[in-house]
Amino acid sequence: MDYSLDLYTYRVSCMCRISLCRLSLQSNLVQDLGLGHNIHVLNYVVSLVEVRGPQSSESVQVTDTSFGGVQARVFESTSPGQRRLKRGVVYFHGGGWALGSGRMRSYDLLCRRMAEDLDAVIISVDYRLAPEVHFPEPYNDALQACRHILTAEVLAALSVDPERVGVSGDSAGGNLAAAVAQQLALDNSASIKFKVQALIYPVLQALDFNTASYQQNGNVPILYRPLMARFWLEYLNGDLKLVPSLLANNHTSVNQGEEAVVAAKAKTNWTNLLPPAFQKHYKPVVPRRGTPGLLQQLPGLLDVRASPLLAEREVLKLVPPAYIMTCEHDVLRDDGLMYARRLEEAGVTVTSDHYAEGFHGCMVFAFWPARFTVGMQSLRNYIRWLELNL
């Protein structure tokens, strides 16, 4: 069924606000009582409803395993015909580095669909999450899994063509995919490299929480502006009381004039990197005085392993061709658009796929019972790009 933008926004907003408010109130109460971290509660509730066992079908064999000690679920196409090497995709799920799993229904369905349509092997990696671990451990898990997968022995066991392996992910998973692609591109000892990277509404920087898209979509479900700042603080092991400081851009104020900060801000300058059509009437937010010592408390804000958008041009020119999906109604829209621009300026082939009616997480709304037109369209185009380029 097709919905108008106003109707679908209303329906999604109602569902998300009611669900998130109920879960947040319950989980915050548990935390306030000293019975556990609220993210534990959210993950527990989601797991009860969403997590599936490894159920194979006639067309896809599903197995839970690990690579280099990192848990993963493998989806192998079992299409009939002459045995041949297949495409391979390493996939990282979203969830703000704190929520979710590759075993959730939405990602299980996504990876099954990819395995079937691409006649491929999809490896959905379950990296460790906050609050059990913080940056750089989720990144280290992602890198460790990829290093292990990108070996002749493992790829041969999976019947994957070493010349046709890609890396992909959505939201925080897109962040990990981009960061790992950069690191492996720099690794001269690796004989097998990723052929492509496909980033789905990725989060790529935490220096500016007032880009045009953050200003435009701060109250748009499902990823609210304060929630994204909280995810970053959970990831970087910061004090959640710093959310207002991040939202005010106090970490990049005028008086934070260190050379490293100035150089990093140039790589997130959306007034230079975004086309005017996306800037609209919004203006940069640059406080004259910020919060002293904030960057010292959160050094990960300037670490390219956490913020791939901050990578140097010499690094970016080495990464594989990229597909970057962005959505108009998403605070992270400009992260993806800026990264696409910086990659293009470095000479990397980029396919930018923007959805005027898209919202954060829309691609998982391609499956029953919440099948939106934008979800089905974005999923088709994503898989089609992989089919043509991998």
Image (cartoon, rainbow, N blue to C red):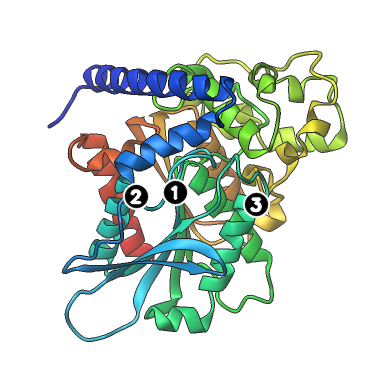
Residue 206 image offset from top left, x and y in percent = 64, 33
Q: Residue visible at 64% across and 27% down? A: 208
> Which numbered disc, 3 or 1, marks the residue closer to the eye?
3
The answer to whether 167 appears left or right of 236 in the picture is left
Q: Residue visible at 46% across and 43% down? A: 94
Q: Residue visible at 45% across and 51% down? A: 169
Amino acid type, mark 1? His
The mark that comes first in sequence, 3 or 1, is 1
Residue 38 image offset from top left, x and y in percent = 52, 29
The answer to whether 82 appears left or right of 329 in the picture is left
Based on the displayed image, in which of its 4 quarters is residue 15 positioned? Answer: top left
How packed is label 1: few (under 14 Cα within 10 Å), some, or many (20 or more)?
many
Q: Of 2 and 157, which appears nearest the observer?
A: 157
Marks 2/1 in contact by CB < 8 Å: the verdict is: yes
Residue 279 visible? The answer is no
Q: Is residue 136 above or below residue 329?
A: below
Based on the displayed image, in which of its 4 quarters is residue 335 positioned? Answer: top right
Q: Quadrant of the C terminus?
A: bottom left
At numbered mark 1, what does the secondary structure look like: helix, strand or loop? loop
The mark that comes first in sequence, 3 or 2, is 2
Q: What residue does disc 2 label?
A: 107
Residue 295 visible? The answer is yes
Q: Quadrant of the N terminus?
A: top left
Amino acid type, mark 2? Tyr
Alpha carbons under labels 3 and 2: distance apart: 22 Å
Q: Say which mark, if any, is on residue 137.
A: 3
Q: Say which mark, if any, is on residue 93.
A: 1
Residue 126 image offset from top left, x and y in percent = 48, 55
Q: Is residue 240 above or below residue 187?
A: above
Based on the displayed image, in which of its 4 quarters is residue 13 positioned? Answer: top left
